[in-house]
Each structure stands twice: as structure tokens, then as C-alpha cells.
Amino acid sequence: MQERLTSMTNNSEFEEFYLNMGPQHPSTHGVLHLLLKMDGEVVTDVVVDIGYLHRGMEKLAEKRTYQANIALSDRWDYLSSMNNNFAMCLAVEKLMKLQIPKRADYIRVIMAELNRIASHLVLFGTYGLDMGAWTAILYGFRERERIMDLFESVCGARLTYNYFRVGGVSADLPEGFIEKTREFIKYFRKKLKEYDDLLSNNVIFKDRVKNIGIFSKEDAINYSLSGPNLRGSGIKFDIRKNDTYSVYNEFDFDIPVGSNGDAWDRYYVRMREMYESTKIIEQALDKLPAGEICAKVPKVIRPPKGEVYVRTEAPRGELGIYLISDGGTSPYRMKIRGPSFVNLQILQKVLKGWKIADVVAILASIDIVLGEVDR
Amino acid sequence: MKQLPGLEYIWLKLIEIFEKICSSLGIPYFFVFIIEKIVFGIILLIFICITVLFLIWMERKVSAHMQSRFGPMETGRWHGWAQTIADMIKLLLKEDIIPEKADKWVHRIAPIVIFVPSLMGFLVIPFEKNLIVQDLNLGILIIFAFSGIAVLSIIMGGWASNNKYSLLGGIRSAAQMVSYEIPLVLSILGVIMITGSLKMTDIVNAQSKFWFCFTQPLGFIIYLISATAEVNRTPFDIPEAESELVAGYNTEYSGLKYGFFMLSEFTNMFIVSAVATTVFLGGWMGPILPPIVWFLLKTYLIVFLLMWFRWTFPRLRVDRLMNFGWKYLIPLAFFNIFITGMFILLIH
Amino acid sequence: MDKQELLNNIKAKFPLIEEYRYLEGYVTDETLTLKVPKEILLDLCKELKNNKEFSFDFLMCLSGVDYLDRFEVVYHLYSMGLKHKLVLKVSIDRQNPEVDSVVSVWAGADWHEREVYDMFGVIFKGHPNLKRILLPDDWEGYPLRKDYARAPDQYD
């Protein structure tokens, strides 16, 4: 950081000053430090400084059993814990070449999609809040409360669920879960239309957010963006369809794609994705088979020696786990490819030339969670 | 329909009795006049304090219900009506912190400079036909003249805090307020052309047949938008843009000084709504109820509208805001004046 | 392109490459894994990205592994157009860990390489800004190495 700072100061001819955005700041979505070099209101250079939430998850994983690692995986992207659990379990099951009961697969998909809706609602709320529409976050979190009630009835927790197990899930759906979920989906679809009118199509919001922070297609692929950031730039790629895992190939859903690659497209792709998730949940509830919820696995899980790379579609992008096992009870090496970590790199290129109000708009549209960035 | 007699009846009766006593005691009229005005001023000050307390509570309740929550419910048992009083007491008891490198005197004076002009605006607000502090010939112009001084205090607040964020907030706010004062005054010019006078009571009396919001709809809309910008409320609340600059020009203020900034925001909101009521909504006129009730009802309606804007719309970016003010509102205001002029020419 | 065809095409251009030999009973997924000598890494990557019949334009993951006698940097590649995957493994000497940086090929490798430097101490030649990324700038030691000294905890 020191050399970077001196190189910035040596080139200044005008009255440029440095603005520290973060680590404590209402709009950086966590402990992220942006060092902005400003010329008046315009940003001329940026240094993205992460690592404030580094907890050493990869080193911790090497000492803990696989079951403890599932509990730890909740904390990577704490807004969508079910998806983290999903990726972790898929990796271990691929190594052990396990066959999972159908019912467990369907329950996993329902939970992952419900969590996707919850996670995108946080983006909806905080993006509105950053732009000054204070009511958006309260509406978003009101819907989130209903989803968290559903999750609480299943596994007892509201944020870090630790619900999945190697071979299935830990507990069956309680009574009344299916009816409550169907009710929630009906209620939520009406609300999505309302949110479109209130925020997505609001003239002032569009004025703040359209044509801001455009990621071109080449840039998006070059910087390994994934998830709604990639789809907002017009590339129709979703791991659930193009590199499918679990039972996603049995469902019928669309992949929403943006046209310009600007912040509004990324935001609107997420709004459309929430609608698609409701379609998946409905189909899964219709087709839910009876049966066991967990395959027979030994008490102490020892996968055979091997390595595997598994990628899943988390709400923020491609969550990948590169798992190397040496036959013991803990992994030899577990590399977590957090989508927000990779997505955040493009900020170094894109921020130059925008005003400080746009910095907030662009940063929020990438939708990062610092737990995943720093691990 | 005939209106019930309002508070002016009581006030005029009191003045009559007082003048009789004073003339029998031999005091010259000059002193009587001054004492009358001082007493009115004190009553007005008390009214302002109560109004602001009520407005803050109203904002919290309105915003809460729009966001599907309750707002203050505990203090004072019934829906938290004493919440603002509790907050004021808390602010009074806070430590007064001045940053070390800040410009001390500018830092201390800024809250006063922002509050006094709003108070002065109350000079010419017509609560009823005879319930106005002094019905100046310059009426409405005085209010706009004083609101221009508020810009100075925001720059003072931003500069004196010795803080980059506050400075940015101060500069943005100055640009915004100066840009939106022009359409504010221009939107009223149409009404003044029809009335032919700047006196507040004349403007209200000219609305006995039709309220000006129907004959000058464009002026009304431009006035509402510019008024929201003048009072620094969303969608134009860049100076206090919480999510970007923490709290803008009042980041470094604590305790009663912060209380003064908040007080002046709500006082300004009330004045701007009172002017809207007088100029566009027919002032104190209305069917049965006493005139003071109608005036307050209409003013609070506009205040509610301003609050509604705040909790629905996102915030405009600075340059887009300036763009909108200079390139759209000002030409529209001129167009309004032109059309009004044509109409007056044709009718006479 | 399927696994054997891909292997043949790459071997035709870069004869030094061979398929990575795993031990008996080692479980892997079906992706082709190549053992790449570090001298030809940068040329190979450029070829893999720019050549239309490979078109590996998406870098999925870049990680470091500490096998006790050597380091390995593992590249997982994916092609958006042709939808095939590839894994490259580069073996690095533990005493003098250096390898070419592929930031000029895939810009997304930037922070991945910084993280490998931070955690293992592998120097990437040609990286524009090789600084510690997750740990504080003045940290000593490289945590993810197997011989990283630390106080024992309850799991030891």
C-alpha cells in the first residue's frame, strides 16, 4: 500500500485529495476499505483494501472434520448459508461417490432457492437505502422475516443454518411447511410487482443507476465475473443450467439477462431471478417425493484419497470448492473460491472517472458480502 | 358559507381593552404598539416550539406507518407523543464537542445563523385576516430574502468542522440551494402578477373565487419541487446524504447545536408549507370551520406531502439535480410567467 | 472437445506437456489434468486463451497447494464458448518458489495470485502489484504452509 500511495502522490499536479471510504461506512456493505484519489467530485484512482474480516477459514478447515466444516461454511457468505452448505456437501459427496435420496435432493433445492430469494432481498433493500429510498430496506426485510420463519421451523436457526449433511439433510420438513411455503410464494409474487413499481421503474432511481458502471462482455469474462454480474452484461450463463448439478435439470426456469451491463441491469437481473426462484420452489414442492432424507454414511466420514473441484450457483456468483483429501477425517487442502472475492477485482478498473455518488451505486450493484471476500 | 369567528376575534378584543387602559394611563401609542408586537412575537415563539415538537413526532409516525412499523409508542403512554420532548431533553444534556482544529467561533455561530432567518420568516405569515405580526407591503419577498441567508450557515457549518466530508456537504448544499431559489421565486411571480401586490393578505383575498392552485397549476408544481429542494429534503437531501457522506455538514455537531439544525429544518418546512397555503391554497378561506383551523389544516397537508416524498423517493445525484433545476424548472417557470402575462393581457 | 482430443491437440503444440499421473485409487472428476513445466506456462496460457479451438477464456480458480516436498499452483480453466474444462498443475520448488504470472492473460487472476503469495509465499513474476491481500502488510510467515509455526490449539 505504501508504494502505491507514493506513486499516486508523485503524479499529482492539481488539488487532488484522498478520501477513505471505510472500513466503517454506512454504504460499503461490510468492512471494506476503499482509498479513493479524488479530483473534486471525480474519482481518479482507487485502491481496494480487503482483509478486515479474514478468519483463516481455509487453514481452519484443515484441522476440522468434514461435519464441522459444514458448520463453518455457513459463515462464508452469511446471507446465503444454505448455498454454502450445498457446495460443501456436493464436494464431499463427489469424492465419496455417494448416491443421495431423491427427497433430500429436492429439499436441498427448495432451501437453496428460498435462500437465494432472501439474499436478493437484502440487495434490494440495501440498494434502495444507498440511493436514499429509506423504505425499501424495511419492505425487503419484512419479506425476509417470513422466509426466516420458514427456516426456523425447519432447522431452528435464522441465519447460519448448518442444515445439510454429507448424504442429505439433517431433519425432515415439519408439518405445515409445504402449505406455508406455497402461501409465501403467492404473497411474494404480488409484492415483487409492487417493488418493481416503487423502485425499479422509479424515474429518480433509474436516473441514479442507469448507464453507471458498465461492464463490457469482454471485461466480464476476462475478470472471471459470475452470477448476476455476468448475466447483467448480456452473457447467458448460469451454472444451474449450463453445468448442472443436483436435480436442477428437472426444473423449468428462465435465465434473466441484462442488455447494457450497467448497474440497473445487474439490479434488475436479481429482481427477475427472485421470480424464477419462486417458479423452481413451486415445481419442487409439486414433485416432492416421499422417502429418506439422508443416505447411509459412516459416523466418521473419511473420503478416499482424491481431489475434486465443484462449482455451484450461489446468489452472488460461482461458489467453487477445490477439495483435496488424503484419506483422513479432515481435508488436506480446501480452497474456497468465493464469488464476491473474484467479482470485486473489477472495481479497480471500473471506478475511474465516476463521481463519488456513483461509487456507492457501482459497489452496491456488484453485491458483495465481506465474509466471502475475506473468508 | 360563513366562517365561524376565529382567534382574531379574541386577539382584537384583547388589543382593544389594552389600548383603552393605556390611553387612559396616558402612555403614547408608540409604546403600546411595541408592546403589542412583542407579546404577539412571544406567543408566536411558543407556537413555533410546539409546532416543531409536533412536526418531529408526526414525521416519525408517518414514516413508521409507511414502512409497516409503529414508530414511538412508549413515552407518554399514548403513541409516544412525549418522544420529542424526551429527545430534546437528551440533546440538552449532551456534551458539546468542538473538533480541535475547527474554527471555534464559526462553529458556534452556524446553528444560530440557520435558525434566526427561519424565525424572521414568521413575520408575515397570515394565520387569519388580522392575525399577522405585521402585514408588510413587501410581504412575500421578505420570506425569500431571509431564506437566502440559510445558505451561509450551511457553508459555515461545513467549513468550520475541519472535515472533508462536511466540506463536501456544505459545498453541495450551497450549490443546490442557490440553484433552486430561482424557480422558487419565479413560480410565485405568476400569482403576484394576477394579484398585483406583494402583501400576504391581498394574495389571500384575491382567491375568494378560485384558489390559485387551479388557475396556476404549473406554478404550484414548480413551487412544490423547489420548496422540497430549499428545505433539503429527499429527493434533494444531498447535504445530509447519510449513506455517502455520513451526515454532511452536521457531522461534527452534537448536543443542542445539532438540535438547532434539526429545529431549523422543520421550521423551514413549516414556513414553506405556510407560504404554499397562502399563495396557492386559499390561505384561511374555507366553509364552516374557523379560519385558523383551515390554515393549519392546509399547511399540515402540504407538510404531510413533503414527508411522503421523503419516504418514497430515492435521492438525486448532485449534477443531475443541478441539471434539473437549471435546464428544466427555470424555463418552465418562465413559460408559466409568459402564459400568465398573455392571459392578463387578453382579459383586460 | 473431449478429453483425448484436447490432450492430443495441446501435445501437438507443446510437446513437453504430459498428462498428470495420479496414484492408484485416487479419485478425480473427469477433467483433463495437465502437468505443466513452469517455463512454458505463460506461452501455454496465451495459446489456450487465444486459439479458437481451445478458447479457454474463463479462469475458474487459481489455488496453491503445499505438498510437503514441493508447492503446486493449480489452474482451473473453463471455456464459455466450447464448454470444456481443463486443469493445469505447475510444480514449484519449495526453496525458491517462483512462477510466471498469468495476469496478462486473464485479468481475474490478479487477486488469486496475491492470495497465493500471501498464504504460501509464491512469487509471481510480472504481477503488477504483488502485495499481501488478506493479512496485514507487516505479517511475518506464510500461514497455509504445512510447516507454519503457531501455538497448538485444542485440535492438536
Image: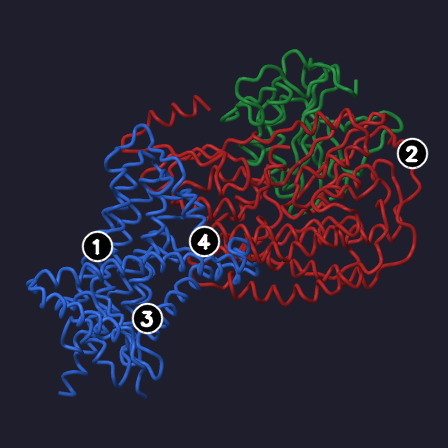
Chain colours: A red, B blue, C green
Q: Label 4: few (<14), some or many (≥20) within 10 Å? A: many
The quadrant of the picture occupied by the C terminus of chain A is top right
Dot 4 falls on which chain?
A
Q: Is residue B306 visible?
A: yes
- Kind of residue sitting beneath label 1: Gly
Which residue corresponds to the image point at 21% horizontal and 54% vertical from the top-left? B148
Where B97 sits versus B219, above or below?
Answer: above
Going from N to C along the chain, the mark reached first, 2 or 4, is 4
Q: Nearer the viewer, mark 1 or mark 4?
A: 1
- Kind of residue sitting beneath label 2: Lys
Where A343 sits versus B306, above or below?
Answer: above
Query: Is the residue at mark 4 from the same chain as the one at mark 3?
Result: no
- Labelled pair 3, 1 in contact (Cβ < 8 Å): no
Query: Which numbered circle lies on residue A299?
Result: 2
Residue annotated with mark 1: B148
Dot 1 falls on which chain?
B
- Labelled pair 2, 3 in contact (Cβ < 8 Å): no
Instruction: Indicate the position of residue C77 as horizontal and vertical percent values.
Output: 67, 37
Q: In terms of image quadrants, where is residue B7?
A: bottom left
Which residue corresponds to the image point at 43% horizontal and 46% vertical from the top-left? B242
Query: Which numbered circle lies on residue A132?
Result: 4
